[in-house]
Image (cartoon, rainbow, N blue to C red):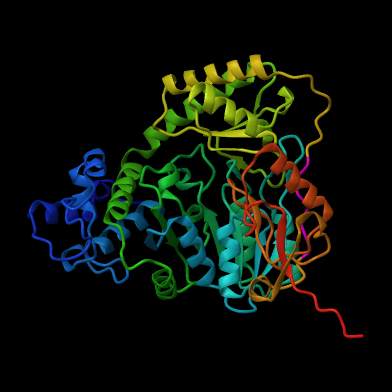
Amino acid sequence: MFLLDEQHHTPLFTGVLEHINKNPIPFHIPGHKQGRAADDTFRTFLGENAFKMDLINITPLDDLHHPQGIIKHAQELAAKAFGAEHTFFSVQGTSGAIMAMVMSVCGPGDKIIVPRNVHKSVTAAIIFSGAIPVFIHPELDKVLGISHGITPTSIEQALEAHPEAKAVLVINPTYFGIAADLEEIVKMVHSYRIPVLVDEAHGVHIHFHDDLPISAMQAGADLAATSVHKLGGSLTQSSILNLQGTLISHERVQTVISMLTTTSTSYLLLASLDTARKQLATKGKELLTKTIELANYARIQINSLAYLYCAGSELLGSEAINQYDPTKLIISVKDLGITGYEAELFLREKHAIEVELSDLYNVLCIITPADSLSSISKLMEGLNHLEKVKKQSVTDVQVTVPDIPILALAPRDAFYAETETVLFQEAAGRISAESIMIYPPGIPIFIPGEIITNENISYIQKNIDAGLPVQGLLDETLETIQVIKEYKPFK
């Protein structure tokens, strides 16, 4: 537990303000020098204070790469708030924190046990580090058409087969708010003296309310990359990496995260982390209680509609779904006979509503402390309109999910291998040299080193035909793909 009084302090933000109020005369970068050399239109829109806070790591403001002053103090307060022993601020987003997390533990040839529905940043870290992924199949939801978490049983089987693994990575919660029994997973993995790494990108808030899934630090995990900006109130691209226990050296983590971090660290982002931590620690429970109540109200309203379904506590009960985050509204639109992407376009064009993501069957809406009955009312107005004008004749919808490909080559070896270009539709049986994903959520369907299958070619084409954003291929027309070059023997 932390002392509430000290959590009201914002040493980093306060230190930056004190520096600004001294009216220093800058002969250092950034060259706009408090906005005076910035574009007039942009400066007017953004305001003078933002430019004044756009500073660099001069001595009075400490240095994220070697924190000794206000940044060190702010990180120590964050560690106490999140129940960690050490907290590292990231201005590279949670993607950067995830890469630092994996690369702090894994080197070339080391095995890491990971769910197959990991974010592309995990894939990048595996390629950079030279680690070998041992993939675990997540539990698939054949009603919603989404992947949930991995089960303790599947992790135990992976550990028995690969006891030499250097780490186990878990997503807690998933993009859709689903959490497995993290405490049981941590206890099991630690019995092998293996650290647990947690992608907590969508769970900064869960640490601060008992009606939300247990957080990584509460469950005893070793490292957790947490997006404060997603649901915690800081600015986009600001994140933290939390560490506890003795299995991973904090000096090692500091070294790796420094290697992956710009030396021009944004004090706007850093100050926003400091103030967001203060709000979460001092007001988080109160704010989240209202948010959960509002989300549950929205869920009831959505489920009163005839052809829309918003998933809730009925999901609980399987081994992969121990807890769920009610602030995530998973809205299935398949009974309307349309795709989630069509629903997203309709809500944008007709009601100026922007959802978090869409896929073939759902849209995802996220409720935060910024929402109100007014915003929920506007969402319901849009969904009511959607149901009235988009209802089509529907036969039984066959929900499809991508197959898990076979890994034929280490991702790093595949990434650096000699490649050739083939037609995407004729690539079955070849080894992919590219990552292919629908973004969001950014979960690769193929990664470098995996064997391309006809089933997944069809799944990707189905997403392309639906208009969903397929990313990763060098060929923006999506007609060709880079595969590992095959040499034919001389005759």
Expressed as whole percent of the image width and height from the top left, the position of residue 469 reads 62, 44
In the rendered view, tell whether residue 220 sits above or below residue 228.
below
Q: Which residues are magenta?
A: 400-406
**Main SS type for the magenta part?**
loop
Q: Is residue 328 visible?
A: no
User: In the figure, is residue 408 to the left or right of 42?
Assistant: right
- Residue 186, how many percent across, how many down? 59, 59
Q: Nearer the viewer, residue 24 or 113?
A: 24
Number of labelled discs?
A: 0
Left or right: residue 273 compared with residue 392: left
Q: Position of residue 282 (x, y in %)?
A: 31, 41
Residue at the spot 54% in from the left edge and 43% down from the top edge? 213
| Residue appearing at x 71%, y 18% in the figure | 391
Q: Residue drawn 44% across and 23% down?
A: 375
Expressed as whole percent of the image width and height from the top left, the position of residue 179 reads 60, 46
Q: Which picture quadrant has residue 431?
A: bottom right
> In the orientation shown, which residue stands out farthest toward the right?
491
Position of the C terminus, as image quadrant, is bottom right
Q: Is residue 58 above or below residue 204?
A: below
Find the residue positioned furthest to the bottom.
491
Which residue: 37% across, 39% down? 284
Q: In the current view of this chain or complex, which residue is farthest to the top?
A: 388
Q: Is residue 389 visible?
A: yes
Query: In the displayed structure, would residue 233 be above or below residue 134?
Result: above
Query: Is 436 inside the magenta-drawn segment?
Result: no
Q: Is residue 97 left or right of residue 134?
A: left
